[in-house]
Every structure is written in structure tokens, then in C-alpha cells.
Amino acid sequence: VYPMVGIIGRPNVGKSTLFNKIVGQRISIVEDKPGVTRDRIYSKTEWLGKNFILIDTGGLEPKSDDEIFTKMRLQVEAAIDMVDLILFVVDAKEGLISNDEEVADILRRSRKKVLLVCNKIDNFKEMPASYYDFMKLGFGEPIPISAANGLGIGDLLDDVIKNL
Ligand code: GDP
Ligand code: MG
């Protein structure tokens, strides 16, 4: 059996973009509308000879009466239970919002290993102020990436396999 790595975060932070970038194919649907990834999407992948299963999830919405959101949340919580390592993705363009804090609470309670990944850093010359705000989430210094432009992905994967 291969170790499993789950991509978790609120909707629209770029989880599916990151998934597709890592697996090298456009398997997962990328959408401007939040909540498009309703089901878990898996792919076996490899970095420097280490195999693992990468899982894309729908975004973790705050608690809601909406049936679809409740189902999405249960799906994500099931995914969290399954995985060995979590990539907690946040969005440098939007910055830290309360929804991120709620995701952080869920992840802390899961007691799983978490790497904080700060996406949408499209220019690595200077980190935006929002990048440093994410330290407040309590998962250490974020790993900067641009999933869209493919920046920082190699360093992120180095960290992933170190933690498997
Ligand atoms: P998900 O809901 O977390 O799966 O997010 P998606 O992968 O569907 O992406 C949401 C939006 O963010 C889409 O419009 C993406 O094109 C955009 N996006 C994803 N990654 C990046 C990035 O690195 N930089 C920028 N500027 N936009 C991105
Ligand atoms: Mg998605």
C-alpha cells in the first residue's frame, strides 16, 4: 500500500490546480465557482522514486444547513481520516480569512501531519504581507507555491516525501 496525501483547504484556494500540476494531467476540474470538486479524486503519483496517492477534495465550507455543503464536508472529513499527510492550502491573494481558521481547527483536531501551503504566490521575488499572516494558523512557515505557474512545486514535493 502507498502512503496517502490529501489536499485540503477552503474552496477556491487552488487545490485542484495543485493536484493537476503534481499529477501532470488535468484530471480534476478547476473552476472559479467554489465547491466544484464534490467527490474525492485520487491519483497515484511519484517524486524522486517515492510513490504516494494524492487526493484532491472539495473545499471545506463552514457548517451550513445546505445539504450539498454538508455532504462535501463529510467527504472531506472522511478523506482527512484516510490520509497520512495533509497539504493545507491557503490563498495569498485572498489572505487569511475566518474560513481558513475553521479548516485549521478541523486539521488540528485530526492530529494528522500537516504542511501549510501558500498558493497564488505568482511572483517569488517578494512574499506578500498575507504570506506572513498565515503563520498565525499555527502550522509554521507556509511553503510558497504558484500552482498555476508551477513555482515552488519541486520544493513542496521534497517536503512531502520527507514527511512520508
Ligand atoms: P479549488 O476550489 O481549491 O480546487 O480551486 P481551483 O483549483 O478550482 O482554483 C480556483 C481558482 O484559482 C481558479 O480560477 C484557478 O485558475 C485559480 N488559481 C489556482 N492556482 C492559482 C495560482 O497559483 N495563481 C493564481 N493567480 N490563480 C490560481
Ligand atoms: Mg477543486
Image: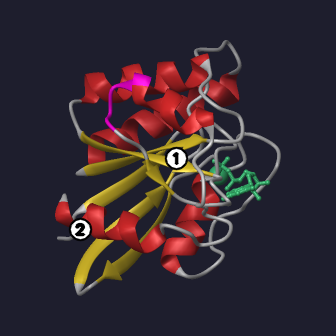
Q: Earlier in the sequence, mark 1 or mark 2?
A: 1
Which of the labelled discs sits on residue 96, or is there none?
none
- The answer for how far apart the CA atoms under marks 1 and 2 are is 18 Å
Residue 83 visible in the current orientation: no
**Does residue 33 show up magenta in the picture?**
no
Q: Nearer the viewer, residue 140 or 106?
A: 140
| Of marks 1 and 2, the one in the foreground | 1
Magenta region: which residues? Answer: 136-140
Residue 44, percent from left and from top: 38, 76
Q: Is residue 37 above or below residue 103?
A: below
Q: Residues within 10 Å of mark 2 (few under 14, many from 20)?
A: some
Q: Quadrant of residue 52?
A: bottom left
Residue 138 occupies quadrant: top left
How many marks on residues?
2
The kind of residue tagged 1 is Cys
Q: Front-most of 84 and 99?
A: 99
Q: Residues within 10 Å of mark 1 (few under 14, many from 20)?
A: many
* The disc label shown at residue 161, or none: 2
Residue type at mark 2: give it.
Ile
The dominant secondary structure in magenta is: loop
Residue at image point 61% right, 61% down: 146
Residue under the image location 29 percent in, 62 percent down: 160
Is residue 38 in sight in this rendering? yes
Query: Residue 143 appears at what percent x and percent y?
Result: 42, 52
The disc placed on residue 118 is 1
